[in-house]
């Protein structure tokens, strides 16, 4: 079977790329070893994060760094045996997070963030997936007045600068809006523009169905079988070998297993994270996802129940899951959210594909004709999947890209 393009990876980034290429007349094969939306895309907090103007930097506060060094926080947990392997990446992340460089990263990410809602909305409408999406924004909740007051000032500036809607809620207003919450938060910022997804995996599957209905081919195969032809590319699937002049690596945290074969040393690392579903409290569930800023976890109302997603775990690939972060977050979240028993037999473990400069890699491989990349979306794969798919497809088909793709080039490293 021959195609115009093979897309490796059926998460939100790969499926979106396949759809945008298909829309431009390309015959596309989408290849994954599992079903669409069953990898990294499965377990996130479900945010389409229009208000995330600034990427998450390496902290500079001595207090925060000391807290992290003690390894007792809910938002970060690290394995001592993994730190040597992560040290060069973390050092580069710290360097890139200096104020001027972080500001540059924010500017570079803005064109993608600004289009994230409109690109999702277009696919949601075409796929008939409206029941999976809520236009209720999300909330940052605070436990200390000092942190809340600082956040109001900072968020107000961001909102005015970028035309975003935001509503500060004191403790009384928060309880009135969210009666399922017990006392514990002194206030919250309600960001109004973002949307949330009640089943991220189902959304990806619905987009994949749209791709198949449009004539696309969904195949089961191992991306590690990718071989260069002369010219073109070949992948082995359960249905046989397929070939195409172009291939897209959209494998999220596993992208290095392919690009590394061809000599590329892109500094891609995974930040681990967990989720667990809980029965909602008798008082009900929040109307929108809520992040507890002091403790770094998110509670998101999902189809299955309340999903608690944790912060970051630093662990080398292959280490078994730990329950440390989830247990810590559950301990501080339960008194406020009042949720009941765990609904999953075991915590879900996922991997966020991260680059130290906080930008994704989108564009052509520098030394291989027909090899294209779209990965490294850090904490915002669900948010940026469709808009990244548009940008990549525009570049691959010779269409004028909607924004300058230079900041996302692979050869910046």
Image (cartoon, helix red, strand yellow):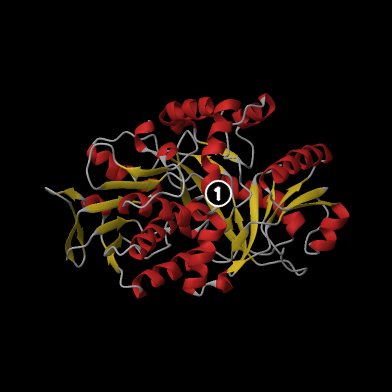
The image position of residue 300, as x and y in percent, is 64, 59
* Disc 1 packing (10 Å; few <14; some 14–19; many ≥20): many
Vertical order, 9 against 293 (above or below): below
**Is residue 361 left or right of 166 when viewed as pictured?**
left
Q: Quadrant of residue 220?
A: bottom left
> Which residue is denoted by mark 1 in the rendering?
113
The picture places residue 195, in percent across and down from the top left corner, at 62, 60
Q: Quadrant of residue 412?
A: top left
Instruction: Mark yes or no: residue 293 visible.
Output: no
| Residue 332, placed above or below residue 77 | below
Q: Quadrant of the C terminus?
A: top left
> In this picture, is 192 found above or below 325?
below
Number of dots carrying numbers: 1
Can residue 152 be seen in this snapshot? yes
Q: Residue furthest left?
A: 230
The answer to whether residue 99 is left or right of residue 357 is: right
In the rendered image, the quadrant that contains the N terminus is bottom left
Q: Residue furthest right?
A: 172
Q: Residue furthest front?
A: 400
**Residue 302 image position (x, y, % from top left):** 60, 66
- Return the residue nearer the eye: 231 or 223: 231
Residue appearing at x 28%, y 45% in the figure: 258
Q: Residue at x 76, y 55 (%)?
A: 335
Q: Is residue 90 left or right of residue 76?
A: left
Q: Residue at horizontal 77%, vertical 50%?
A: 188
Q: Which SS class for mark 1?
A: helix
Q: 246 or 406, which lies in front?
A: 406
Q: Position of residue 144 (x, y in %)?
A: 81, 41
Quarter of the rendering containing residue 183: bottom right
């Amino acid at each position: 079977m021959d195609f115009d393009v093979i897309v490796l990876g059926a998460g939100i980034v790969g499926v979106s790329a396949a759809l945008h290429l298909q829309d431009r007349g390309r015959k596309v094969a989408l290849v994954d070893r599992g079903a669409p939306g069953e990898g990294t895309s499965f377990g996130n907090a479900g945010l389409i994060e229009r208000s995330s103007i600034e990427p998450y930097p390496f902290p500079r506060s001595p207090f925060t760094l000391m807290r992290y060094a003690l390894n007792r926080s809910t938002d970060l947990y690290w394995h001592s045996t993994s730190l040597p392997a992560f040290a060069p990446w973390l050092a580069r992340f710290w360097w890139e997070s200096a104020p001027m460089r972080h500001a540059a990263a924010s500017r570079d990410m803005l064109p993608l963030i600004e289009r994230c809602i409109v690109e999702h909305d277009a696919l949601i409408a075409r796929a008939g997936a409206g029941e999976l999406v809520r236009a209720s924004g999300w909330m940052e909740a605070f436990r200390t007045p000092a942190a809340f007051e600082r956040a109001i000032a900072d968020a107000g500036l961001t909102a005015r600068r970028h035309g975003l809607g935001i509503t500060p809620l004191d403790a009384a207003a928060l309880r009135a809006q969210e009666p399922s919450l017990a006392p514990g938060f002194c206030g919250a910022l309600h960001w109004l523009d973002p949307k949330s997804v009640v089943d991220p995996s189902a959304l990806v599957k619905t987009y994949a169905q749209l791709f198949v209905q449009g004539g696309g081919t969904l195949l089961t195969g191992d991306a590690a079988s990718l071989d260069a032809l002369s010219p073109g590319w070949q992948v082995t699937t359960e249905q046989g070998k397929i070939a195409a002049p172009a291939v897209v690596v959209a494998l999220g945290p596993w992208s290095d297993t392919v690009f590394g074969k061809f000599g590329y040393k892109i500094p891609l690392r995974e930040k681990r994270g967990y989720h667990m579903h809980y029965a909602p409290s008798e008082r009900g569930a929040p109307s929108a996802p809520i992040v507890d800023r002091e403790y770094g976890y998110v509670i998101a109302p999902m189809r299955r129940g309340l999903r608690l997603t944790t912060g970051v775990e630093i662990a080398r690939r292959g280490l078994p899951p730990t329950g440390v972060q989830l247990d810590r977050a559950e301990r501080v979240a339960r008194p406020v959210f009042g949720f009941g028993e765990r609904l999953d037999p075991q915590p879900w473990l996922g991997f966020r594909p991260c680059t130290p400069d906080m930008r994704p890699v989108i564009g052509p491989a520098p030394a291989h004709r027909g090899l294209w990349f779209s990965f490294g979306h850090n904490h915002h794969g669900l948010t940026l999947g469709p808009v990244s798919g548009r940008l990549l497809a525009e570049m691959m088909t010779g269409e004028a890209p909607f924004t300058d793709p230079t900041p996302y080039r692979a050869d910046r490293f």
